[in-house]
Image (cartoon, grey):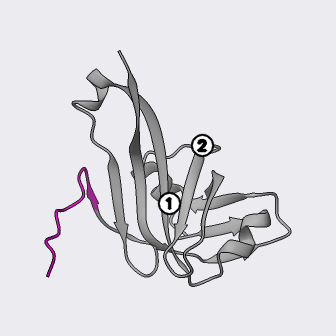
Amino acid sequence: MGSRTILKGKLHRVTTTHSELHYEGSCAIDEDLLNAADIREYEQIDIYNVTNGERFTTYAIRGERGSGTVSVNGAAARKAAPGDLLIVVSYGVLTEDEVSHFQPRLVYVDARNRILSERAAIPVQLAA
């Protein structure tokens, strides 16, 4: 039986709060946001920069709980600046049986990276 790589967690349109070029590479994320999206510290994450179109892979580290921190660090700091909107995602490899009942953790935030809502599916949007 095969497996598939599936979206596991997503932080949708978080705002970059810091960009630290001379810090060890990673992305520090408010612990509340990590927990809500089921992203673990040191887990691989992909970051999609809505503001400038950059896409890159790094790993998550725990930021101060309740701070709203989203700090892109190390070489990746050249790909995101404070104020940029980011989509942060993690993926998991699931068996076909697991995929049939799996639901991702999708987290939507306000401009200060405070959680507005959590969902298990992306809403269907019809073309205008």
Local secondary structure at mark 1: strand
In the image, residue 59 above or below residue 22:
above
Badge 1 density bin: few <14, some 14–19, many ≥20, Cα 10 Å: many
Q: Main secondary structure of the magenta part?
A: loop
**What is the three-letter code of the residue carrying label 1?**
Val
Residue 117: quadrant of the picture: bottom left
Residue 90 location (% of width, % of height): 49, 48
Which region shows up in magenta?
Answer: 118-128
Q: Any mark on residue 8, and which?
A: none
Residue 18 location (% of width, % of height): 67, 76
Residue 103 visible in this rendered orientation of the protein: yes
Q: Residue at x 34, y 49 (%)?
A: 105
Choose between 118 and 87: the one closer to the eye: 87
The N terminus: image quadrant = top left
Instruction: Measure how far apart labels 1 and 2 are at the Cα level.
Output: 12 Å
- Give yes or no for residue 62 being in the magenta stretch: no
Choose between 68 and 37: the one closer to the eye: 37
Residue 123 location (% of width, % of height): 19, 62
Residue picked out by circle 1 = 88
Residue 64 visible in this rendered orientation of the protein: no
**What is the three-letter code of the residue carrying label 2?**
Glu
Task: State if disc 2 and disc 1 touch (CB < 8 Å).
Answer: no
Instruction: Describe residue 39's horizontal placement relative to residue 7 as left or right.
Output: right
- Give yes or no for residue 120 being in the magenta stretch: yes
Extreme residue toward the right, this view: 22
Residue 70: quadrant of the picture: bottom right
Residue picked out by circle 2 = 43
Instruction: Describe residue 109's horizontal placement relative to residue 112 as left or right.
Output: left
The C terminus: image quadrant = bottom left
Choose between 97 and 85: the one closer to the eye: 97
Residue 73: quadrant of the picture: bottom right
